[in-house]
């Protein structure tokens, strides 16, 4: 689709300098702008590019002052970055606006499907599944028996939802992710016999899960991700874990079984948390933290493996770096002590 500068300025409540009829059909970075694209300038660091860019339209702040001729049409707004983000959201909505059910898909007769649903090629919706309104199910998605999916949820290509799982409204699940796979439980005293996993996974509303994640079903009950939880790519959440509202976990996080993570927590990349712990609300974990005991005090920052209070870790790290010199000093003292004893 194409849009003119005047149409975009009307949406953004901006003013135009240049050709109001110039059309764009895509977005671009200002340093790599091409004809037919729209870009923005917010960071002064990128100001030189506005004089060389080939982007047809550039969004700028109201107080921007040009010192050289500019070939692009400008749209002046109060906040260029926010305005461009608004455009990106609109562009994404248009790009992902899909509807209709592909002939090559399979929907069980006992399944119920809401209004304005998109089901792509080779997607499977199994018996007794319930699909809400405006749901988008991309090609090669599997939705298992008795699964419930709330309104406006998007499942990108290749997502697998095992039986009995429940997804809330406005969720986004990216390609390759599996919800409801078996938890890792075996009876070691009985020759490693597998313990059946008969629970499910429950997602609240507005949950987003990145690509290639694994969220295990509970042994009994539910593995729960609360409203607004966000997981990056390549995250593993084990059986019976509960992650409460609006907590964010970056890539390569691993949370072992039955751990409860509080609200508004933020975990950086490659964090590992062992089983049956409790992590207090508003906890921050630095990258590669290894959590081996519960964190009871809300709003604290931890780092290291085993994880400890960040201020203590930083002090300890000073000593870690000086270990070689400390060892040398101890060796020298022991040598001197041995000489004194021999005398």
Image: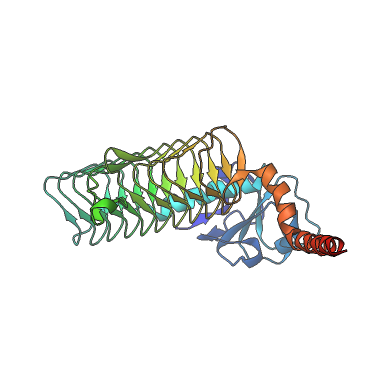
Viewport quadrant of the N terminus: bottom left
Q: Is residue 210 visible?
A: yes
Viewport quadrant of the C terminus: bottom right
Residue 31 lies, in percent from the top left, at 66, 65
Query: Would you say 26 lies left or right of 177 here?
Result: right
Figure coloring: rainbow
Q: Quadrant of residue 79?
A: top right
Residue 262 lies, in percent from the top left, at 48, 35
Residue ID at (57%, 32%): 297
Of the pair 251 and 187, the residue shown nearer to us: 187
Of the pair 339 and 322, the residue shown nearer to us: 339
Query: Would you say 168 lies left or right of 84 here?
Result: left
Q: Is residue 7 visible?
A: no
In the displayed structure, 242 sits above or below 192; it is above
Of the pair 103 and 204, the residue shown nearer to us: 204
In the displayed structure, 324 sits above or below 217; it is below
């Amino acid at each position: 689709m194409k849009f003119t500068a005047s149409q975009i300025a009307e949406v953004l409540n901006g003013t135009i300098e240049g050709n109001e009829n110039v059309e764009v059909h895509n977005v671009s970075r200002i340093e790599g702008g091409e004809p037919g694209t729209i870009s923005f300038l917010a960071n002064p660091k990128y100001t030189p590019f506005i004089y060389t860019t080939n982007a047809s339209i550039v969004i700028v702040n109201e107080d921007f002052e040009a010192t050289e001729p500019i070939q692009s049409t400008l749209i002046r707004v109060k906040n260029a970055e926010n305005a461009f983000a608004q455009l990106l959201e609109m562009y994404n909505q248009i790009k992902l606006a899909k509807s209709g059910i592909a002939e090559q898909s399979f929907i069980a007769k006992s399944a119920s499907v809401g209004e304005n649903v998109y089901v792509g090629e080779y997607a499977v919706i199994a018996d007794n599944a319930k699909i809400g309104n405006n749901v988008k199910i991309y090609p090669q998605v599997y939705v298992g028996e008795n699964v419930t999916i709330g309104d406006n949820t998007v499942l990108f290509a290749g997502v697998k939802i095992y039986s009995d799982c429940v997804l809330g409204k406005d969720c986004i699940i990216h390609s390759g992710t599996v919800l409801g796979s078996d938890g890792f439980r075996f009876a070691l005293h009985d020759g490693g016999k597998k313990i059946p996993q008969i629970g499910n996974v429950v997602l609240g509303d507005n949950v987003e899960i990145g690509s290639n994640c694994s969220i295990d079903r509970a042994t009994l009950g539910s593995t729960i991700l609360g409203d607004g939880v966000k997981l990056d790519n390549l995250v593993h959440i084990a059986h019976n874990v509960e992650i409460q509202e609006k907590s964010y976990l970056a890539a390569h996080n691993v949370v072992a079984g039955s751990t409860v993570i509080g609200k508004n927590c933020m975990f950086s990349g490659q964090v590992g948390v062992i089983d049956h712990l409790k992590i207090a609300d508003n906890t921050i974990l630095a990258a590669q933290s290894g959590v081996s005991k519960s964190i009871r005090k809300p709003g604290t920052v931890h780092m290291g493996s085993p994880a400890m209070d960040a201020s203590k870790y930083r002090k300890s790290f000073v000593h870690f770096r000086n270990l070689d010199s400390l060892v040398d000093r101890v060796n020298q003292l022991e040598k001197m002590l041995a000489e004194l004893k021999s005398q």
